[in-house]
Amino acid sequence: FEGVSTGTPIAMVIFNTNQKSKDYTNVKDLFRPGHADFTYYHKYGIRDYRGGGRSSARETAARVAAGAIAKLMLRELGIEVQSGVLAIDGIEGENIDFDKARESEIYALDPAVEPAQKEAVLSAKNAHDSVGGVALVKITNAPVGLGEPIYYKMDAVLADAMMSINAVKGVEIGEGMHAASLRGSQNNDQISAEGFLSNQSGGILGGITNGDEIDIKVHFKPTPSIFQPQRTVDIHGNEVTCELKGRHDPCVAIRGSIVAEAMATLVVADMLLLGMGRKLSDLQKIYI
């Protein structure tokens, strides 16, 4: 009301006026390789073949809208969440610049490798194929103390949120998988009076934020919708050929980086609210 929330739930409706359901008529009785058609059908006995229903990337529009609301809250606390594309088709950036990502057509974090990343996407598109990619999300100025020691760890909740995004196959926080090849003397973040001397942990220790930057790598598989004939079966078990039509992104990681940013924003907002009552003194400040 008058630009301010009233305390009641905020509801938003996004109308999709650019759908082309007829593009999916030829696949209504078969299972598209790499999609959730097979599992949805066998679990529920029915599926929405017109794009995949909840397994479609269209579903993520609601997440981005909700994330925009949560971002307003974080802004009041000086917390910033940024994202961009780190790698496409194995071509990875080194000199990360989140400001440059916002100016990039593919949200590339490193302008030096952007041309090669673009070429990889176009090459896959021209070959009627697709490529995967890695998004990088950075959370800055998150306070110390967000997250719980065991069952609601900050890194576990972030990973859960990212893995809930369609097409995400892996999540790394801080050094991530590379930490498994390091020694403790290399991986430990030593501490001085001014703060941590490195950030291998990605801003989270013991499931709780330590005040440093939180770095999240989100790995997206290649878009499963490709314009090449593929073997599959129909709902009756007959072997058939799947040939797709329609409009499909050759690299879902590009748009996916924005979805990952929104999910990280929502998680931080949730954790801030959850942490309000971790001490009796906190509750007293609110209610007394």
Image (cartoon, grey):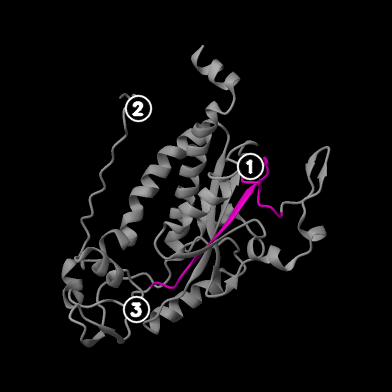
Q: Which mark is residue 209?
A: 1
Q: CA distance from mark 3 to mark 2?
A: 44 Å
Task: Point out the tag, 3 or 2, that comes first from the N-terminus.
Answer: 2
Residue with the mark numbered 2: 3
**Which residue is tagged 3?**
226
Looking at marks 3 and 1 on the same chain, the residue that comes earlier in the sequence is marked by: 1
**Callout 2: SS:** loop
Residue span colored magenta: 200-223
- Residue at (37, 69) in percent of width and height: 249
Q: Nearer the viewer, residue 282 or 139?
A: 282
Residue 98 image position (x, y, % from top left): 58, 53
Let me know if residue 7 is in the magenta part. no
Instruction: From the viewer's side, name the closer residue of 182 and 53.
Output: 182
Between the C-alphas of marks 2 and 1, the distance is 32 Å
Q: Is residue 253 left or right of residue 37?
A: right
Please say whether residue 206 is one of the residues in the magenta stretch.
yes
Quadrant into which the N terminus falls: top left
Instruction: Give residue 65's quadrant in the image.
Output: top left
